[in-house]
Image (spheres, coloured by chain):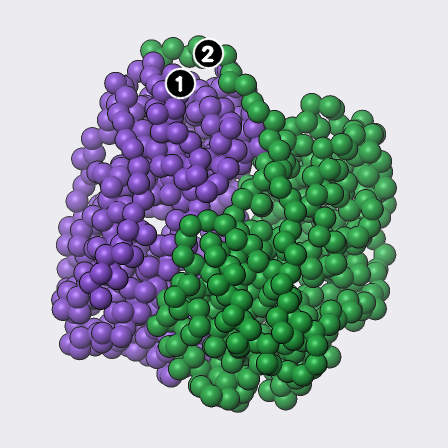
Amino acid sequence: MFILVSLTYFAYMIGFERQILDNGLRVIVHRDEGTPMVTTNILYDAGSRDEEPDSTGFAHLFEHLMFEGTQNIPLFDVPVMMAGGENNAFTNNDLTNYYITLPATNLETALWLESDRMRGLDLAEERLANQKSVVTEEFRQRYLNQPYGDLLLLLRPLAYRVHPYRWPAIGMDISHIEKADSISAKKFYDRFYTPSNAVLSVAGNVDPDRVFSLAEKWFGDIPSGVKTERKLPVEPEQAERRELTVHRPVHAPHLLMAFHMGSRESRDFYILDLLTDILAGCDSARFPAILVRKKELFSEADIYLSGEADPGLVIFSGRIRDGIDVRKAEEAVRSELDRLASERVIAAELDKARNRYESHRLMQYISVSNKAFSLAYHEVLGDADGINREHEQYMSVTAEEIASAAGLTFRPGNSSVIHYLPEKI
Amino acid sequence: MRNKEIKGAPEIITPSAGDTSLPEPVMLGNGVPVYMAGNGTVDLLRIEFVIPAGQVLEEVHLAASATSAMLTEGTLHHDAATINDLIDSTGAALTHSSDKDTAGLVTVTLTRKLDDVMALASEVLFSPSFPENEFRMLTDRRLQAFQTSRRRTSVIAREAFYEALCGSRSPYGRITTEDDYRRLTTGDVREFHRKHYRPVNMYVTVAGSEPWKALPVLEKYFSGKGTGQWQKPPLPSPVLETSEPGKIFRDLPTSVQSTVRVGWKGITRNHPDYQALQVATMILGGYFGSRLMRTIREEKGYTYGIGAVAGAFHNIGYITIMTDVANAYRDETLSEIRKEIEKLRTEGVSEEEMTLVRNHMMGELARIFDGPFSVADAIRGIIDYETGADYYTRLAETVKTITPARIMDIFNRYFNPGEAWEIIAGSR
């Protein structure tokens, strides 16, 4: 048994080489000869937690501006397409991430493009005005014009009082986006979009030494800037249950319950990640089996981690069946959560969650772009090799740890609850 | 200060699609074809069973999707809870899907669990029991999801388009109501399963690092099933009633945006213009820098995104443009779409734009043929619609050689403003 475990362990190792340029840019290379492609992933350590409370949504708006061209390359997409590539980006509460996947023969084009937009941007008012309008429509399309689309917009300010996680990456309100100006954009760029605040991760059919010398060629002369030092307010421990009831034009009620937990790097993260898998990771998990099928209270019942770098949330999210009272539904969730602290999860449940983690990890890391992002993410957390330590973290979680984390986390006083109800007609 | 000067751009190597040929099938003892896509180093297999059991074959509306969703809700040997437990304890995933023309069951498993997972796949596909209580619960959940979807402008606009294109009496254009859910019985589902889920109608794709490892296991669980030899079932040709082109409005009083959908009747996949139409749609709205994205997102800022696609069911094709915009911009959006199409019909595209789209599509083809999973998906499109194993080779050839004149001809032939439906779903 021991031998089997160690053999499979090697299958989960992601090899890489790392160099740091003189200007502080961290460069990571993973070689994968099974593909003709390469992904260049550049992660900036700047997310919505770095925004001011009266100008939220800015980091994400800025991500849009990064595609608006520079003095050297007015249309960012044209060279990417000419090289046969595809590219995109995303912003969350912690970071902003950009990637290009293209044939490995055109690696240098991707590095040229990324270095150019780290060198200087064209922040013309007209482009800013246009992207403000685009982001406003994105806000409406994804959060306001979807049934239940504003659930997470409502949750954040309820669960957090001081930490900037109290607003979502899209922003607290459309009016914040509307008033963004090019002076703040320039400031944001100068502060965060620098070599010392970025990680460049390259995964694919490439020679690491060639990547390092090309990184030096294209990024080496960009001034280093100042690494982000965060002094974010620490969220005080929650003392009492918080509850919010809203009415919306939807057909069925929805219940959201959130609990504060540890940071991404804490042991808490791995214990609770495995625990939420036992509760709702698959059809035979407890919530689908008990809350959906046996008790017929919910039509869907999920629980997951928000997964931020600073202490985050465990979020229960359930669509309640017609005719079921929201308090009765909440009571049933409560009783399942309480049971976790008093009864140990059984070995078969734990094994199942570990097996699922293994398959999931194998599946995830088939793609070079996932490997490139994950390496960059772990590097910004502290060490790219963290990607290889996760397996052991998950495999070593015990039933006792789960019971004790559940007892600590799922206290009623640690909860923020939203009753999202249909408007009375 | 940063030095904004940059050294000369690196030379771009023109992307090529690479090898776009598809594998020949291996037959099981009963003739069921198995298509294998092998590559990569990861010890996982993805096996998909494709069954000609889509909505197009329904006699009772919703029977196809309900049958597919009920497969894992109980078999002659196991109840739903046990099935779920058996799947989950192997770390495998088992996903059913049902669309207009076909249904499928996808399994993803660690190679060492292959035998257990195939035993289960065979059981859920061919010995389901359709228990009454699970059916009632599933119907309730599906009805609730349906009711929620009625608040989405994008769903309502799509429904209006297919109704206009295919007619409400055809399986492609049928309008679903709450009563359709309430009327459906386990008898309907049982009957649909009996008629259409037959091993001798299906084919299998296997993708992973060592796909041939699946063959003896597939032989063991699927070759003895059913009677007779495999035969390719004929493509169904439902009767269609295409309505007159024109404007269609669907009122959703609480919406803060409108979905705008412009559509035309297209062509089926074996039509000689199909590949050229793919290139034309790419130019119009298939990528970030496309004509529509440049104007309607990047210049006007009306929307987060706008796209155009050309596709086809068995016996009818479609071309459609879709976007979500603020209620105030929807008329301007329609008029900008008309203008862009008019330009493509009269002024055409430049050689430069042509090269850009050419390289982009070559890169896209190279990505399709990069991993075994996406190759398996490509195989599925080709078999389902009988487009011939050389479909992607022909597409690559078209992309390489197509001229601006031919593109202009395609726009004049298929994007006639007088033949379009202009659909808006939003609040009045």
Q: Would you say residue B255 is visible in this rendering?
A: no
Q: How many other residues sit within 10 Å of disc 2, few (<14), some (14-19) or many (≥20)? A: few
**Rendering coords of residue B365 (x, y %):** 62, 41
Q: Which structural element holds mark 1? A: helix
Q: Disc 2, disc 1: CB below 8 Å?
A: yes
Q: Would you say residue B94 is visible in this rendering?
A: yes
Task: Give the camera-side residue of A273 and A135.
Answer: A273
> Which chain can be seen in purple?
A
Residue at point 41% right, 39% down? A32
The picture's colour for chain B is green
**Rendering coords of residue A76 (x, y %):** 53, 26
**Rendering coords of residue B157 (x, y %):** 67, 56
The vertical placement of B139 against B103, above or below, is below
**Viewed as shown, does residue A14 lie left or right of A292?**
left
Amino acid type shown at disc 1: Trp
Tag 2 residue = B7
Q: How many other residues sit within 10 Å of disc 1, few (<14), some (14-19) or many (≥20)? A: some
The vertical placement of B195 against A418, above or below, is below
Identify the chain of the residue marked 1, using the numbered disc in the image.
Answer: A
Residue at point 33% right, 59% down? A358
The vertical placement of A225 against B195, above or below, is above
Tag 1 residue = A218
